[in-house]
Image (cartoon, coloured by chain):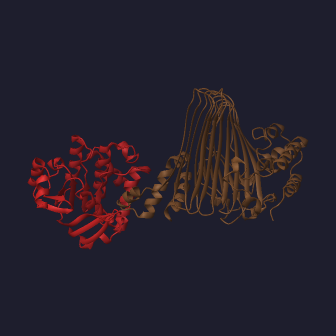
Chain colours: A red, B brown
């Protein structure tokens, strides 16, 4: 589904990614861990098409296509979803109409019919309940005045409604208490299917107690320095990142 | 060539002669007094603080000396194209500044609606005496000239304790026959004690090329406990000039809520004067302006708290595109005796281009010491992160921008309440937000 080869990228002339390689197959959940400043978020942002990054080398193929050639909205229309670390507040933009417009933009791009009001309402209510997002927040402006937890739940709700092929979760656990973390993780787990690939970017192992990854990668100094099974996350939790950084430097 | 003051005077006198005369000498005297005042004041220029950011040169060069032809039109004038699905209880239609009875529907029960021209014809002294009672002879040359030369206008009197079931509408349509002319009108809105009404005013044009000068003075008087919700949407021709002066006077526990939109015209200015005459009255003003290349929108607010325990809230937001310009000058004065006043004034601007320009000047002048007042202003741009967020959810960039513009103005647009008005405004905003 996703093949990243030798990806290098810089911000303002400073090299952040120094040759990242990663393969994600449909149905797999990959965790990307690493210390602060290792390039985790940069990788997530580049995949979703955020500007401010210069890709200096390598390639990213998504479903056989050159992902980096696609506009931000084209990526979304083709099934890439980024759950953001800091979801943006959109005052005056109604949450529910935004969600509906988003679904329809994606459907239109795929040549599908727009969603009818009734099934949209039914779905959005059901899925909001699943992620424990207060229904009142659906009628408010997108993320405006939401708590940190509410914003993340709203991201997961969007993900559930948009049904992406590739979901990227950027530090979705940051700022969440344990209950919210569990709800968010449940939401993610509910979306695990044989067709969907996921990349979970996180600093802490904590989230991985709830979302069991198939593979764990450690990103440090712009490279994946270690890959392994879910046990690697536990090892990191116990030993920290220091030993890996030393090994990588050696 | 720019006409001289005496050209204006001559044309005004000629215009007066065409008007119904049975109003008697009293109205004529008043017009002549206003004309004298006009001569004394002349037109304002940028040396006066109120006109510092808004040049009238372009307007004066156009030489709108002659009022529009006032022969009764029996044409349809495409009025139907401008009707909206609003559950109105009555509609007054003005074409080129003249009341057209054939297109109007009178409301029934408890509200008296007529035209100033009819009041002049019958010599309705009560109505005619109210003309100019709030505006005076005119604070500037334009206002004085309007009083001297106005041809027509609406008179709406809502009787004591009457509550209208739906909105009244005043529709101002400018036809291509208004080209090069001025359209001086005045409205009188008299809300008697305990009455409640909603008034929707719209300014539309047959086309987007006609160049004319619509000048309107509105006097609104609210007796004790009366309430008026007043919505105004200015969508004049893109080449037109529009000047509105609103004078509002509130007695005890009266409440006025004005919601304004300035969208059309190459030059538009709205001056709102709010006078609390007795305590415990409330005034709210919400407004939005959209300007594009070659457009200027100007809002001047003068909210005067001289009596105690009144409250006012003003919130104006603007969207500026291309080389569009806007002026916001909001003044709130709280006099010495106006203890327990509450006043909040806010202006926010979203700049969609580097060429757009706004001059914003919210001012509070407070002489009382026991008051709650605030004011603020902001000038910003669309947030790149917000655009990215929307695009990452599948919306293209144009739609993302339009949605953010719409979101920025939503709190004002929502105050227009009626779906037909909200859609009208959002359609216009999609266009503004999307193409830059």
The residue furthest right is B25
In this rendering, position of residue A54 left or right of residue B433: left
Viewer-side residue, A15 vs A122: A15
Residue A56: quadrant of the picture: bottom left
Quadrant in which the C terminus of chain A is drawn? bottom left
Viewer-side residue, A216 vs B66: A216
Residue B112: quadrant of the picture: top right
Q: In the image, residue B197 lies at what x, y percent?
A: 63, 39
Q: In the image, residue B394 lies at what x, y percent?
A: 36, 62
Vertical placement of residue A57 versus B2, above or below: below
Residue lying at 51% horizontally and 59% vertically, measured from the top left: B352
Vertical placement of residue B106 versus B237, above or below: above
Q: In the image, residue A243 lies at what x, y percent?
A: 10, 54
Residue lying at 69% horizontally and 31% vertically, measured from the top left: B277
* Viewer can see residue A79: no
* Viewer can see residue A170: yes
Q: In the image, residue A26 lies at what x, y percent?
A: 18, 64
Residue B26: quadrant of the picture: top right
In this rendering, position of residue A198 left or right of residue B257: left
């Amino acid at each position: 589904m996703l093949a990243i080869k030798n990806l290098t990228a810089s911000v303002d002339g400073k090299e952040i990614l120094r040759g990242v390689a990663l393969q994600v197959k449909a149905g797999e959940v990959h965790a990307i861990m690493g210390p602060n400043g290792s390039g985790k978020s940069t990788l997530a942002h580049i995949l979703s098409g955020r500007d401010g990054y210069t890709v200096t080398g390598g390639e990213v193929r998504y479903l056989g296509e050159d992902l980096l050639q696609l506009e931000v909205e084209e990526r979304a229309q083709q099934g890439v979803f980024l759950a953001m670390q800091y979801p943006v507040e959109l005052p005056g933009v109604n949450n529910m109409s935004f969600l509906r417009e988003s679904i329809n933009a994606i459907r239109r791009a795929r040549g599908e019919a727009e969603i009818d009001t009734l099934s949209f309402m039914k779905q959005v209510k059901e899925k909001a309940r699943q992620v424990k997002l207060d229904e009142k927040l659906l009628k408010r402006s997108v993320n405006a005045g939401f708590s940190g937890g509410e914003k993340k739940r709203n991201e997961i709700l969007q993900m559930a409604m948009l049904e992406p092929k590739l979901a990227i979760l950027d530090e979705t656990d940051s700022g969440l208490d344990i209950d919210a973390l569990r709800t968010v993780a449940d939401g993610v787990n509910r979306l695990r299917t044989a067709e969907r690939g996921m990349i979970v970017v996180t600093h802490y192992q904590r989230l991985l107690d709830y979302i069991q990854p198939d593979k764990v990668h450690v990103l440090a100094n712009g490279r994946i320095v270690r890959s392994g099974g879910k046990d690697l996350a536990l090892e990191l939790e116990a030993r920290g990142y220091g030993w890996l950084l030393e090994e990588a430097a050696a | 060539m720019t006409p001289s003051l005496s050209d204006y005077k001559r044309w005004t006198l000629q215009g007066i002669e065409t008007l119904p005369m049975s109003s008697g000498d009293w109205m004529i005297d008043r017009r002549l007094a206003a004309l004298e005042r006009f001569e004394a004041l002349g037109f304002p220029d940028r040396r006066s603080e109120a006109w510092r950011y808004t040049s009238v040169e372009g307007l004066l060069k156009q030489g709108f000396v002659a009022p529009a032809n006032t022969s009764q039109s029996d044409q349809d004038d495409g009025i139907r194209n401008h009707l909206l699905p609003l559950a109105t209880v009555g509609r007054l239609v003005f074409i080129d500044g003249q009341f057209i009875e054939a297109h109007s529907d009178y409301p029934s029960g408890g509200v008296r609606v007529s035209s100033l021209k009819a009041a002049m014809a019958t010599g309705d002294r009560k109505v005619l005496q109210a003309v100019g009672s709030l505006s005076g002879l005119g604070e500037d040359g334009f206002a004085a000239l309007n009083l001297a030369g106005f041809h027509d206008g609406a008179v709406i009197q809502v009787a004591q304790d009457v509550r209208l079931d739906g909105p009244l509408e005043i529709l101002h349509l400018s036809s291509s026959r208004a080209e090069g002319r001025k359209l001086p009108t005045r409205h009188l809105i008299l809300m008697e004690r305990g009455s409640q009404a909603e008034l929707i005013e719209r300014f539309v044009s047959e086309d987007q090329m006609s160049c004319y000068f619509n000048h309107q003075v509105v006097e609104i008087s609210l007796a004790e406990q009366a309430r008026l919700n007043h919505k105004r949407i200015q969508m004049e021709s893109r080449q037109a000039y529009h000047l509105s002066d609103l004078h509002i006077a509130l007695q005890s526990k009266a409440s006025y809520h004005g919601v304004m939109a300035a969208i059309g015209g190459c030059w538009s200015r709205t001056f709102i004067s709010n006078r609390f005459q007795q305590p415990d009255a409330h005034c709210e003003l919400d407004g939005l302006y959209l300007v594009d290349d070659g457009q200027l929108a100007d809002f001047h607010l003068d909210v005067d708290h001289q009596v105690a325990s009144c409250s006012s809230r003003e919130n104006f937001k603007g969207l500026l595109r291309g080389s569009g310009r806007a002026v916001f000058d909001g003044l709130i004065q709280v006099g010495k005796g106006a203890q327990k006043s509450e006043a909040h004034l806010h202006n926010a601007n979203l700049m969609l281009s580097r060429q757009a320009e706004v001059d914003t000047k919210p001012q509070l002048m407070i002489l009382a010491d026991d008051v709650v007042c605030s004011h603020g202003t902001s000038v910003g741009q669309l947030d790149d992160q917000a655009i990215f967020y929307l695009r990452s959810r599948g919306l293209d960039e144009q739609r993302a921008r339009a949605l953010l513009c719409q979101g920025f103005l939503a709190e004002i647009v929502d105050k227009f309440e009626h779906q037909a008005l909200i859609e009208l405004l959002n359609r216009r905003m999609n266009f503004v937000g999307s193409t830059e």
